[in-house]
Amino acid sequence: MSLFLIGDSIKLTLLVLLILIFVDYVYNLRTNNIFRRIGMPGPAPIPLLSAAGLFEHGLPVLKDEQWKSARSIVSPTFSSAKLKAMHSLMNDVSDMYNERLLEYADKQEIFDIKTINGQYTLDIIASCLFGVETNSLKNENIILINHLKKFFTLTLTRIFLLFILIARRRQCLERRNDFIQMMIDHEEEIKDQEVGQQSKSLRKTLSDKEILSQALVFLAAGYETSNVLMSFFFYVMATEPVIQEKIYQEIRQEIGDNEVTYEKLNQLQYLDMVINETLRMYPPVLRLDRVASKDYQLGNYLIPKGTIIHAPVYPIHHDSEAWPEPEKSYLKAEKAKRHPMAFLPFGEGPRNCIGMRFALVEAKLGIVRALRLVEFERCGKTEVPLQLGKIIVLNSKNSIFLRVIRRSQ
């Protein structure tokens, strides 16, 4: 089934794709002019290409009633029940991930954690969104970028074949617990439902092109962010062995050798704390963009309707007012005492990241199953501290080399 996604007609730049659907060059220029007009100092614009084609129906670029309608349809896809249905697909990929880690352990091989995490997240997202098995974890000798080029290359023929796939799902000729199937199931579920007075103006279904557009958006946004989270997390494990041991002990106590279910993942409170701290220290998305829906007076400044507001996530997460010692670990910090906007790894408000629950389940499953089998250690090639590349998505400038050893049960 992956044949229709293979080709070499476009260049892949995942870092650009993540923000591509939010901002285009014209808006950035306009924003900079607005800064000058209202007398507020502001940063120079970053020129980017505008998003078009299949991405034009994605949630990030929709507005007002179109966005509200699409969001109401897509949101249930990431409910607890739907994520549990995808759990078996994630487990299959996690099995391959663990096999690779054990191979590294047995060979005493140093490896780049970013590479294997990229393969893990690509395989899970491809499987859970499109029902496509990329198997990049099984083909470790093939450069990951080639897998990504194949997946992101959509010629007219392959797009047509993807529409055929959706049509076959609609006709119940094939079925799989992935994103596309759940979107189609949603349409069937609401056919017999009465539409309430309040929601009569909202469409209850999406076209095939709109379904495909949402899936591509989640692919572009989810791949790099999940990879970044897991890579920085395992870097923390290797450089903070005491924290790694505490997480391991929590896993043994709460799960033991039993199956790592969706419910069990939600019981690991200390793991959640460490993941959140990793997201604070290393937020995958460096900037959030919002549009003023009306004129707004902010102190001495009037923010005109239509102004694009940039929220700099990394500076906020390292602001000494919210975090007196930004580079210090805040695992036990009291959440109630912090400003609610001091922690924004997935955005905030109605337009927060709708796929954050999927990303966290994907990451936590890989983390928990891996830590039960191996212990992560730094090696001679581990860069401490890491040099960070702050362009669009936060990442390390260089490879994150680690090693793993089998745990003795």
Image (cartoon, rainbow, N blue to C red):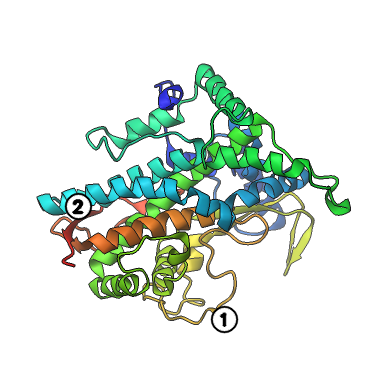
Q: Nearer the viewer, residue 184 or 383?
A: 184
Q: Which of 193 and 102 is in front in this view?
A: 193
**Residue 68 showing in the rendered view:** yes
Q: Which residue is drawn at 49% across and 24% down?
A: 154
Label 1–label 2 contact, CB within 8 A:
no
The amino acid sitting under disc 1 is: Ala
Residue 260 location in percent, x, y? 38, 60
Q: Which residue does the numbered mark 1 point to in the structure image?
A: 336
45 sits to left or right of 75: left
For the C terminus, which image quadrant? bottom left
Determine the CA span between mark 1 and mark 2.
41 Å
Residue extending farthest to the top is: 157
Q: Crowdedness of circle 1 by 10 Å Cα count: few (<14), some, many (20+)?
A: few
Q: Which of 277 and 166 is in front in this view?
A: 166
Specify which label sits upstream in the sequence, 1 or 2: 2
* Helix, strand or loop status at disc 1: helix
Point out which mark residue 102 bears.
2
Residue 201 location in percent, x, y? 85, 45
For the N terminus, which image quadrant? top left
